[in-house]
C-alpha cells in the first residue's frame, strides 16, 4: 500500500504568507517599542509565534506586555493582513483537485492558530478539500516536534508511514520526518541550497511540479 494521505503546512506552502508575517512582525513589534527589522524577521520562518516574541524580548528587552498577550496581538496583526490579501499560491487549487480525484485524504498541519487555518481555507475557497485542520498552537509542543503531524494522521485515520507531508521550512521538514512520514520540501529561493534539505524525500521548486506524472510515481 502506498501514500493515502497528504498533509500540508499552510504558511509558505498553501499561502504566500511568510512576507506578510514578516511585515506584520515589523509593524507590531515597532508599535510596542522594539526596533525589529525585516532582517530580524526573515530567520523566523517556521518558528512558533510565542518563541518569536521571546527571542525579540531577549534581544531588545521585554515590552510591558506578557509573552502571551504580545503573541496574541502579533497573531491578530498578521491575521488581519493575511485575510485582507488572501495570498493563495497559484498551484494550490489544481493540486488539491488532482489529489481529490485520486481519493487522497488531505489535512493541514500548521503552527498557526486554528482560527486562522479555518478563516484562510474558507476565504480562499479550499476548506472543503481538507478533512482535518490541525494547529500546533493547541498542543504542548510545536514543530520540529512531530505531534501536529501525528495528530493530523490520526484525524485522517491513516498510519503515519502512509502519509506525505509538504513543508517549506527545515523546522517543518524535521517534524514530518520525525513522524515517520515521507516529505516534500519546497524551500524559498534564499534557502534552496541549505544542505539540511537532504533529509527530505523530494525537493521541488513549487507545487506546480507535483503534476500527474509526479503523482503517478508517488502513488
Image (cartoon, rainbow, N blue to C red):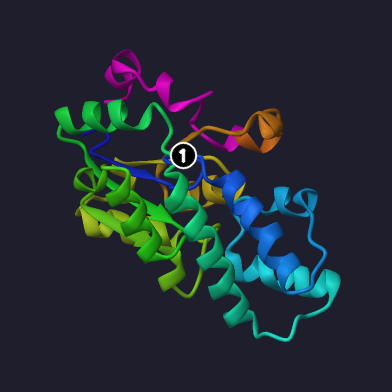
Q: Secondary structure at mark 1?
A: loop
Q: Residue at x 72, y 50 (%)?
A: 43
Q: Which residues are magenta?
A: 198-219
Furthest residue in direction top, as rendered: 213
Residue 51 point in image, percent of width and height: 65, 68
Residue 148 point in image, percent of width and height: 41, 60
97 horizontally vs 20: left or right: left
Q: Is residue 96 magenta?
A: no
Q: Within 10 Å of the Cα at label 1, are there few (<14), some (14-19), or many (20+) other Cα atoms? A: many
Q: Residue at x 58, y 73 (%)?
A: 71
Q: Residue at x 34, y 18 (%)?
A: 211
Q: Circle 1 sits on which residue?
A: 13
Pick whichever, 84 or 184, lies toward us.
84
Pick whichever, 152 or 85, lies toward us.
85
27 horizontally vs 166: left or right: right
Look at the image and tell me in which quarter the N terminus lies: top left
Amino acid at each position: 500500500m502506498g501514500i493515502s494521505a497528504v498533509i500540508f503546512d499552510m504558511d509558505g506552502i498553501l499561502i504566500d504568507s511568510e512576507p506578510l508575517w514578516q511585515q506584520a512582525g515589523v509593524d507590531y513589534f515597532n508599535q510596542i517599542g522594539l526596533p525589529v527589522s525585516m532582517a530580524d524577521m526573515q530567520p523566523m520562518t517556521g518558528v512558533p509565534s510565542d518563541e518569536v516574541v521571546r527571542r525579540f524580548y531577549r534581544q531588545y528587552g521585554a515590552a510591558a506586555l506578557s509573552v502571551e498577550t504580545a503573541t496574541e496581538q502579533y497573531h491578530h496583526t498578521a491575521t488581519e493582513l493575511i485575510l485582507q490579501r488572501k495570498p493563495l499560491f497559484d498551484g494550490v487549487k489544481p493540486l488539491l483537485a488532482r489529489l481529490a480525484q485520486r481519493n487522497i485524504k488531505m489535512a493541514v498541519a500548521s503552527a498557526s492558530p486554528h482560527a486562522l487555518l479555518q478563516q484562510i481555507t474558507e476565504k480562499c475557497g479550499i476548506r472543503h478539500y481538507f478533512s482535518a485542520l490541525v494547529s500546533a498552537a493547541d498542543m504542548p509542543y510545536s514543530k520540529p516536534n512531530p505531534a501536529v503531524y501525528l495528530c493530523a494522521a490520526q484525524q485522517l485515520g491513516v498510519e503515519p508511514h502512509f502519509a506525505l507531508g509538504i513543508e517549506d521550512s527545515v523546522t517543518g521538514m524535521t517534524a514530518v520526518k520525525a513522524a515517520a512520514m515521507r516529505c516534500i520540501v519546497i524551500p524559498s529561493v534564499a534557502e534552496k541550497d541549505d544542505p539540511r534539505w537532504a533529509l527530505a524525500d523530494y525537493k521541488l521548486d513549487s507545487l506546480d511540479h507535483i503534476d500527474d506524472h509526479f503523482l503517478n510515481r508517488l502513488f
